[in-house]
Image: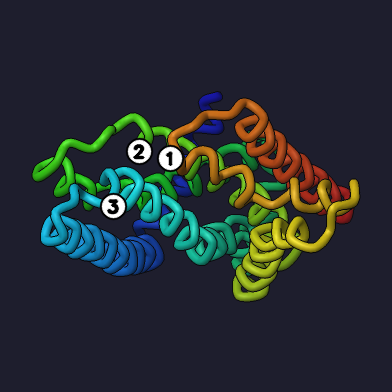
Amino acid sequence: MSNILIICHKELKSYFASPIAYLLLAISAVVFGFFFYSATAIFVVRGVESQMMGRGMPMDVNEWVIRPLLTNASVIGLFLIPMISMRLFAHEKSTGTMELLMTSPIRDIDIILGKWLGALLMYACILLISAVNFVWIFAYGKPDWKPMLVGYLGLLLQGGCMLAIGAFISTTTKNQIIAGGATFSTLLLLWVLDWVSAYETTTLGKVISYVSVVTHFEPFSKGVIDTKDAVFFVSMTFFGLFLTARSMESLRWRA
């Protein structure tokens, strides 16, 4: 366990020792800030229009602001996660330090879990930046905080799943750009697989749609914790880390 934490700390520190972390945090802050401003502006305008027509507010703030923003946060993650995961192992291979890791007394699983956990903490920092925007809602309103907390739990589970897939892809190449592009393409495919349910009702179509990460995040965005969705994300994370371990084993065998 100590080896995992040491590698995790080293990995997280390496993000902030380069412009990567600050660039990702800045992109997240700007993009999510724009989404937040737009969502709240629309909510206020619709509320004023409803009051002028003698009606109450159109809907509650959780439905009009928080839920769409959580969905938008997951979309931001789709673009940023490949940038986080692409360096996990590709950077080690390109700099020649992969051989040192492979010959060290540290187990492969400790290396994998440490790097994955460091990447997950980097993603958690990005989510924390987005959560700062919600302080304004609590300052001027009384939204229900429980659905928001569940939504962020879903974002972490989804992020962990996608980072595990990105970690595996990162072990297959020493070029970080290729690793990032391949990860984004894979995650984008997993993102749109639920479109199959719109025109395919066979068992195969349902299975393909089930693999979509969007399908399983939607209940979390509504503030609902469904066991099958949590199990899906955990299973996909385990599968991604398992493939990463097999890839590391292959590298050790070829070395």
**Which three-letter amino acid code belongs to the residue tagged 2?**
Met
Q: Nearer the viewer, mark 1 or mark 3?
A: 1
- Which residue is painted at 44% across and 50% down in the image? 123
User: Where is mark 3, residue-wise?
Assistant: 129
**Which three-letter amino acid code belongs to the residue tagged 3?**
Ile
User: Where is mark 2, residue-wise?
Assistant: 148
User: Where is mark 1, residue-wise?
Assistant: 151
Number of residues whose C-alpha sits closer than 10 Å to that of mark 2, classed few (under 14), some (14–19) or many (20 or more): many
Q: Earlier in the sequence, mark 3 or mark 2?
A: 3
**How far across and down, in percent of the image, does residue 129 sit?**
28, 52
Above-or-below relation of 27 to 154: below
Q: CA distance from mark 1 to mark 3?
A: 15 Å
Quarter of the picture containing the C terminus is: bottom right
Above-or-below relation of 161 to 231: below
Q: Residue furthest front?
A: 54
Q: Nearer the viewer, residue 88 or 253?
A: 88
Are dots 1 and 2 in contact, CB under 8 Å?
A: yes
Task: Name the side, left or right, on which 118 lies relative to 98.
Answer: left
- Which residue is painted at 75% across and 40% down in the image? 239
Q: CA distance from mark 3 to mark 2?
A: 14 Å
Q: Nearer the viewer, residue 70 or 172?
A: 70
Number of residues whose C-alpha sits closer than 10 Å to that of mark 3, classed few (under 14), some (14–19) or many (20 or more): some
- Which residue is painted at 62% across and 26% down in the image? 227
**Which three-letter amino acid code belongs to the residue tagged 1?**
Gly
